[in-house]
Amino acid sequence: AQSVTQLDSQVPVFEEAPVELRCNYSSSVSVYLFWYVQYPNQGLQLLLKYLSGSTLVKSINGFEAEFNKSQTSFHLRKPSVHISDTAEYFCAVSEGYQKVTFGTGTKLQVIP
Amino acid sequence: KAGVTQTPRYLIKTRGQQVTLSCSPISGHRSVSWYQQTPGQGLQFLFEYFSETQRNKGNFPGRFSGRQFSNSRSEMNVSTLELGDSALYLCASSAGQSDTQYFGPGTRLTVL
């Protein structure tokens, strides 16, 4: 069975500092990997995804994540965070079907 | 294209009652998935429908049920509500199997 681990429940970081949100997964087959962001009182928005091909994927707002098969990781990074990045971030894994498994989420708090 | 819409956005019920939540997917999307989000359990998969057929199901009791109509709109029903059913219920749609899911804003259900 697939599973996702987000070890950090909260990550405080100063504005304009870099950040890394960690995600590890387990699965016995090839997977699709996702990062979603959830702003307060809103649904989830897809931030970026890895389906195949290049292991480094990027979003339009400066986030990037790298698929590392040997370490079964898909960490999310941003070189310089902004106040507006304050949100909860969820890593998710899917084995090609719609039954997506989500991690428990990491709350990113950007400190001015 | 309009996004995924969910109605109602907020709902208050009492124990023992039943509730029906509605989800309208993005036009052309045939797959609809439902998730329950709570502070304690995080995001948990409820079930997924594709072309009016339930294709996947999570580990929830039979009080939770759903259906999908020919226009891909989906409803979720919870009978005999319990306090623990208080949660944000999220619906997500996708074009088909293995396609990216797009989430609605959710329905916040409070059971008193």
Image: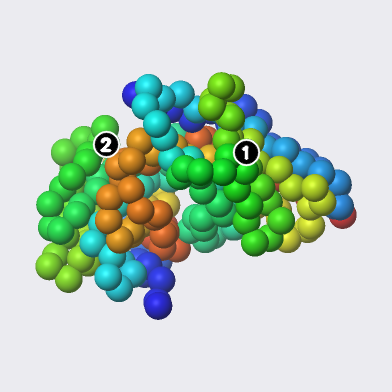
Question: Which residue is drawn at the image coordinates 22% and 41% (left, top)?
Answer: B56
Question: Is B19 left, or right, of A11 in this rendering?
Answer: left
Q: Do labels 2 and 1 share a chain?
A: no
Badge 1 sits on which subunit? A
On the image, the x and y values in percent for residue A74 come to 58, 35
Residue A84 against residue A98 in the figure, above or below: below
Residue A111 seen in the figure: no
What element does badge 2 sit on? loop
In this view of the protein, which residue sits in the foreground, A110 or A27?
A27
Q: Which residue is drawn at 33% across and 58% down?
A: B94
Above or below, B16 relative to B8:
above
Which quadrant of the figure contains the N terminus of chain B? bottom left
Q: What element carries label 1?
A: strand
A107 and B107: which one is in front?
Answer: A107
Query: What coloring was used for the rendering?
Result: rainbow
Label 2: how many Cα within 10 Å (few below 14, some 14–19, many 20+): few
Chain designation of label 2:
B
At x 24%, y 48%, the residue is: B48
Indicate the quadrant where residue B23 lies: bottom left
> Residue B58 — which label?
2
Categorize mark 1 by other alpha carbons within 10 Å: few (<14), some (14-19), many (20+): some
Q: Which amino acid does label 1 sit on?
A: Glu
Residue at the spot of label 1: A66
Q: Nearer the viewer, mark 2 or mark 1?
A: 1
Cα gap from disc 2 to disc 1, whole angstroms: 29 Å
Give the number of the disc on residue A99: none
Judge left or right: residue A82 versus residue B42: right
Amino acid bearing label 2:
Gly
Placement of A100 over or under A82, stated as above or below: above
Residue A103: % across, % down: 50, 35
